[in-house]
Amino acid sequence: MGSGHSSHLHVDGDTPLHRLPPHVKLLALLTFVLAVVAVPSPAHGVLLGLLLLAVALLATTRVAPRHLAPRLAVETPFAIFALVLPFVATGPRVELGPLTVSEPGLAAAVALLLKGTTGVVAAVAFAVTTRPRDLVRALQHLRVPDPLVLIASFMVRYVDVVADQLRRMRVARLSRGFSGRSVRSWPVLAAGTGALFIRSYERGERVHLAMVSRGWNGRMPVTHPLTATRGQWALAALPTLVAVAAAIGARLSS
Amino acid sequence: MTTPVLDLHHVAYAYPGGHQALFGVDLHVHPGESVALLGPNGAGKTTLVLHLNGVLRPGHGSVHVSGLPVTEDTLLEVRRRVGIVFQDPDDQLFMPTVRDDVAFGPANLGLRGAELDARVVEALEAVGVADLADRAPHHLSFGQRRRVAIATVLAMRPEILVLDEPSSNLDPTSRRELAEILRSLRTTILMVTHDLPYAVELCERSVVLSEGTVVADGPTRTVLADEDLMRAHRLELPVGFAI
């Protein structure tokens, strides 16, 4: 069966970020990112400072850079967009070495890159230190509606099962001489997607049956409630406070 | 005579589409028994199993679990008493970790804290996989997942364990190991299976269900030795296997 192929984000460790309760971390991440977004875009120096803060936080997780690199790649589309921006934006032009680019475009690109990277770095710092199961518990603790928590939890659990099914269907197609290279193969791929959907739906029904058979009554039981000390809250609030102060400072001085 | 753990009286059921799956089934299982429920594909075995914990309710007849009638008000207690292990462990194991999954049933019954933790460990130890508690179900081998699926039900301390095709998809070693585990459990067992040698090995009594009715009920060896009965209901022992 297909196991071990999935790129799990979490990396075991025993650092301050690993030890923080997941709901505390999740709230801290959310407020930190909101504060970073609230910094005025021209304040490049402030944004660079916050990026360095996020990188420092990521460094405290002591996760190897070669493990982090693929996780940071999620930013690539935004980075490409930011790189194109100075060339396609309008407004006054400036010389940049041999190139002539749009000045507001360049400023927007730098701000976008800085904000985007800060957000991704902070999110990766959260993801590598938080087990998927704890993320689900944090959502539950923060009173996110049960259906949403269940959807997240089932996605964590069944993404591999569905991916495995998809792979088996692909192998079965290839084994009967199918090649998906031309437009004519699209109906086959569409039918395969439909079959996968129906199989997943039927699995959902069977899982529901198994849940009902073990006394499920529509609410997920909270077996081990999360707790946090004041010290943990204070520690988690530090980066957010720095970012909020930076955002206010930059707004006042701009 | 003891009160039967399972007492089905004239149970008939038709699906909403009109297909009638059960035509008046009578079945009694007493405490301590291991009973095999045999029958060809489409005999109504799964439909029958879903009646045992009230997922389906009979159109006619009645189901009692240790004397308790299966009604809307008794569902939670019935589901605690009757533990069903489904065929595909991926359907049974839906939580992110093995520990959470085994805790799911007893937590629904209201257990919390140390009592819940102890129940989880007890169930995992009963099937010999206590070391897997913090693993994710999709990282386990098929045999391990089948065992954990049984633990999820044992954690509710059921009075009867209902297993749907427990030996399917297992390699010979896992199949034998599972048989040893099932024999070691001190629970009443109803085993739905096509694996007739497994029935001989584990169950002293067999019930044959065919086209929605019970056509045979007796000692497993006697039932399986009746060649005419077996042939009439599409049941065959593997080549080279003799009773």
Image (cartoon, coloured by chain):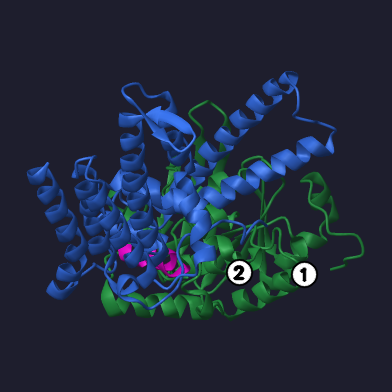
Residue A87: x percent and y percent?
Answer: 44, 27
Residue B29's disc is: none
Question: Is residue B231 shown above or below A91?
Answer: below
Residue at the limit of the structure toward the left, as seen here: A252
Q: Looking at the rendering, in which quadrant would you find the N terminus of chain A?
A: bottom right
Answer with mark 1 or mark 2, whichever residue precedes in sequence: 2
Question: Is residue B59 shown above or below B6?
Answer: above
Q: Which residue is mark 1?
A: B172
Cα separation, mark 1 vs mark 2, equals 14 Å
Callout 2 secondary element: helix
Residue at the limit of the structure toward the right, as seen here: B240
**Toward the viewer: A207 or B109?**
A207
Q: Amino acid at mark 2?
A: Gln
Determine which quarter of the picture holds residue A5. Answer: bottom right
Same chain for mark 1 and mark 2? The answer is: yes
Which stretch is magenta? Answer: B98-107
Q: Is residue B45 magenta?
A: no
Which chain contains the residue that carries disc 2?
A: B
**The chain coloured blue in the image:** A
Q: Is residue B7 left or right of residue A19?
A: right
**Toward the viewer: A194 or B206?**
A194
**Toward the viewer: A240 or A10?**
A240
Q: Residue at x 42, y 42 (%)?
A: B57
Q: Which residue is mark 2?
A: B144
Q: Residues within 10 Å of mark 1 (few under 14, many from 20)?
A: few
**The chain coloured green in the image:** B
Q: Is residue B99 magenta?
A: yes
Callout 1 secondary element: helix
Determine which quarter of the picture holds residue A38. Answer: top left
